[in-house]
Every structure is written in structure tokens, then in C-alpha cells.
Image (tube, grey):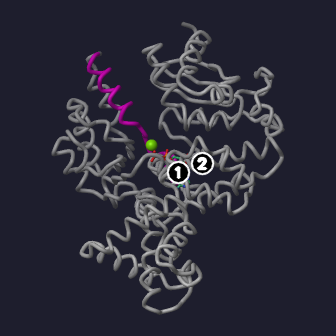
Amino acid sequence: MNKDELWQALLAQVQFNISKANFATWFKNTGVFSKKDGEVVVSVPNNFSKEWLENKYNKLIFKILCSLDDEIKEVRYAVAPKTAQKIGENIIAAGNSAYNEAPQLDFQELKVNKDTNLNSRYTFENFIIGPFNELPQAAAWAVAQNPGLIYNPLFIYGGVGLGKTHLLQSVGNEVLKRNPSKKVRYVSSEKFTTGIVNSIRNRDIDKFKSTYKDIDVLIIDDIQFLSGKEKTQEEFFHIFNTLYEKNKQIIISSDRPPKAISALEERLRSRFEGGMIADISLPDFETRVAILKTKLQEKKESFPDEVLEYVATNIQSNIRELEGALNRLIAYQKLNNQTPSLAVAETLLKSVIFSPKKITNPEKIIQAVSVFYNLKERDILDVSRKKEIVKPRQIAMFFLRQELKSSFPFIGRKFGGKDHTTAIYACNKIAKEAETSENLAEEISLIREQIYRM
Ligand code: ADP
Ligand code: MG
């Protein structure tokens, strides 16, 4: 199958998997730019489609491509030069022609260095720090300054889309920035496994291993994929030891801590646990807003706070999805020359926001709590120390923490400018009491129901 046939076959299948509207919006004017050495570069008409395909459809595209051609190992996306595009009525493309005033080639993904596998777009400079990722960021930064000498290995874990790859790659880029002669290599666990499997098949495993022996910084992403792959683990263990004994830096990421990776050899697990382990947790509401604002600033855009808060309230556990939503709003803005209002944002993001039932915000929480205890919202937010108000206020604080992952300083400020220690105290107190008091536990569950009904 040549590259155009391949893409036609893919489109035919994609159509069955997604809605008509989505298909028309995101797959119009796409094609295959090149197909070489197992790597397919998909050409897309603009940055928005690129982000969208990467974030939302990459899995589907990859799966279908692999089923059509089993040599395919990797898919990348690149914005095609404007002249190469057919002129269609596709609204996004139309909006984008204004956007792409100066037709810029965005072969960003192609900026991946073939030796190091590092993508220059991932840097510490554009990595936003909040309470949820402070520790791993600090550890990664320290490692980048002194590879091999501080935390070895450095093991970073956290959920999907929370910045593991970004952070790992930043270390690699930073090391090279400081010292271009260092040998850095980034490799995904899948690629590593494929390498091992192929070299076993070709009987040149020693050659494969020798390519790792002079590396100064080895970065292995998503190590959980080695789970159950004994032969790969064994070879990795040898490579690990060789480098470790020479004080070379090893950095590993995973979606879970070492002890939770099933079918991982004990000796590897204890190696991982012998270094520094840091987790990326979920960004709280404030940090999510800050991430949106920073990303907007980078793109020289600005949206009303209520729109950003809407996005941050509804997308809680994935920074990639936050970015995707933002790009969608920016697309709207470019297209209509108009800042999206809250109502527009709600409509545009309907499909992105996954579980509408599980959505709330501070206002709804405060409203639900005050209705439940028959108080005025003003009272809850105020400084009164009356007993009948103190408890509902603490419960409201508790919900802000539980349901929205709001930070303690944010909670403190929200409730009459109190100190973060007051918020910590309130949240702990309610959590603890709910464990022993059935009444309180019952109240909490009733209020929670109300919150999600508002
Ligand atoms: P993971 O590897 O954990 O699945 P990624 O590193 O691929 O997540 O991050 C997903 C997207 O979110 C990327 O575009 C990345 O640049 C962005 N991102 C994640 N964390 C941050 C952060 N702290 N600051 C800025 N961008 C971030
Ligand atoms: Mg990743």
C-alpha cells in the first residue's frame, strides 16, 4: 500500500469510529506526508488539527495504521505548508488561513533529534510548577545540574497527561544545553522492548547493548510497559547496572510507583526504590487556572476569567486535555474574531468534558452547604465564629478540598481571608469526625448529592 492508499484506508475506518461532525472537522485536508522506517508523518492543515489529532485521535489512528501495515511503529503529525493544502470549506481550515498569516512550517515533531530522541519543545522554562509537581520538578532540575551525582535513579510517576514526558525530556535538553558533549538518550519502554526483541531475533543483542554503554544520561519513559516482559527486563537490568556502576544518570517514569508495577522483577524494583522516587499528583484548581493562563500568554491570547475557570473546573486530571480545550477555544476565537463567552465555551467543550455529572465549582459547593444548613451563603463566607456557622463553613472547606482539590491557601482566602492553616485544620477535622460520626458521614453524603445536582 502506498502512503495515499494507506491514508484512504485509514479514513474509511475512522469514519466508523467517530461522529460525522468530528470527522469533517478534524480529518479534512489530512494526508500522509511521508512513510519511512516504520514512521508515518501525517500532514494536517493547521496547528489546531495537529493538537487535536495528537491529543484525541492518536490512539485510534495508531491502532488502525498498525492494523493496516504492521511495519508501522510510530506516528507523528506535522502542519503541511499552506500551498499544499486543498482549499476546503472546512471551518477550521478557513479560520486558520487567517491564523497562519505567515505560513509557518510546523515540523516541531520532526525536531526530535534522531540520536537523543529529545524534542526541543520540552524544557524546564515552559514547565509550569505548582504544589502538585514541585517535588519531582525540583528533583529533575537537580539531576539536570549534576547528572549521576545526586538522585540515581530518579523515578517519577503520575497519571496520564500530567507532564512526565515533558519533565523527563526537559532534563535531557537541559543536560545538553549545559554540556553539549554529554551523551543523552531518551527512549520509550515500548521502543526499548522492540529494540530488544528485534536484536534477539537478529542475534545481535550484544551490539544492541553496546549502544547503551557510553551513555551519560539514560531516560526511559513509561517503564510500566516492561511489566511481564522478562527478557526485556533482564537486558534492561544489565544495562542499568553497567551505567549505574559508572555513576551515569538513569531517569525513569511510570504511571505508578515501583511497588505497584506487577510482574516486575524484584531486583529491578529494589534498584528503582534505591534512588529518588517522586510523584506528580493532580493539579489543584488554582494551578489549573494558572496553567491555562500561562499557555494563553505564550500564545498571546487572553480569555475572560469565567471561561478559564469553567475549563479548570471541568477538566481536572489531565493537562493534555486542558491544552486541548484551550486550543479549541483559541480556534473559535481566530475563526470568529471574537472572544468566546462562557456560553460558547460550554457548547464548544461539551464533547471534551467527559463526565458532566462529576462537575462542580466553589460556588455550587457553598450554595449546597448553605441550603442544607439553612444559612445564608454570606454567613458561611464571613468571619462569624458562631457555632452553628463554624461547622457548615468547615464542611464547605472540606468539600472544596475533596471535590475540587483546591489548595489550602485558596480555600482560606475564599472563606473570609483566613490563613491556610485554618483551612488545613477544618479539612482534617471534618475528615476525621466523619470517620467516627455516622451522622456527619450521612450529612456529607447528602450534601455531596446536592452539590452535583446544582
Ligand atoms: P505524560 O507523559 O505524563 O502523559 P506529558 O508530559 O505528555 O504527560 O504532558 C501532556 C501535555 O501537557 C504536554 O503537551 C505537556 O507539554 C503539557 N504539560 C504537562 N505538564 C505541564 C506543566 N507542568 N507545564 C506545562 N505544560 C505541561
Ligand atoms: Mg508520557
**Residue 218 appears in which quarter of the rendering?**
top left
SS assignment for the magenta stretch, majority? helix
Q: Is residue 102 left or right of residue 63?
A: right
Q: Residue at x 43, y 83 (%)?
A: 421
Q: Quadrant of the C terminus?
A: bottom right
Q: Residue at x 31, y 55 (%)?
A: 152
Q: Are marks 2 and 1 in contact (CB under 8 Å)?
A: yes
Q: Is residue 117 above or below residue 2?
A: below
Nearest the viewer among 346 and 229 is 346
Q: Is residue 435 above or below residue 122?
A: below
Q: Is residue 185 left or right of residue 376?
A: left
Residue 375's spot in the image, x, y percent? Answer: 52, 81
Q: What is the residue that sits farthest to the top in this orientation?
A: 1
Q: Is residue 139 left or right of residue 453?
A: left
Secondary structure of the residue carrying numbered label 1 = helix
Q: Quadrant of ligand 2?
A: top left
Tell me if the residue at label 2 has its CB under 8 Å from ligand 1.
yes
> The residue under label 1 is which amino acid type?
Ile
Residue for badge 1: 319
- Which class describes the residues within 10 Å of circle 2: few (<14), some (14-19), or many (20+)? some
- Which class describes the residues within 10 Å of circle 1: few (<14), some (14-19), or many (20+)? many
Q: Residue at x 57, y 8 (%)?
A: 2
Residue for badge 2: 323
Q: Is residue 336 above or below residue 410?
A: above
Nearest the viewer among 88 and 356 is 356
Nearest the viewer among 392 and 342 is 392
Q: What is the residue that sits farthest to the front in this orientation?
A: 374
Residue 394's spot in the image, x, y percent? Answer: 43, 80
Tell me if the residue at label 1 has its CB under 8 Å from ligand 1.
yes
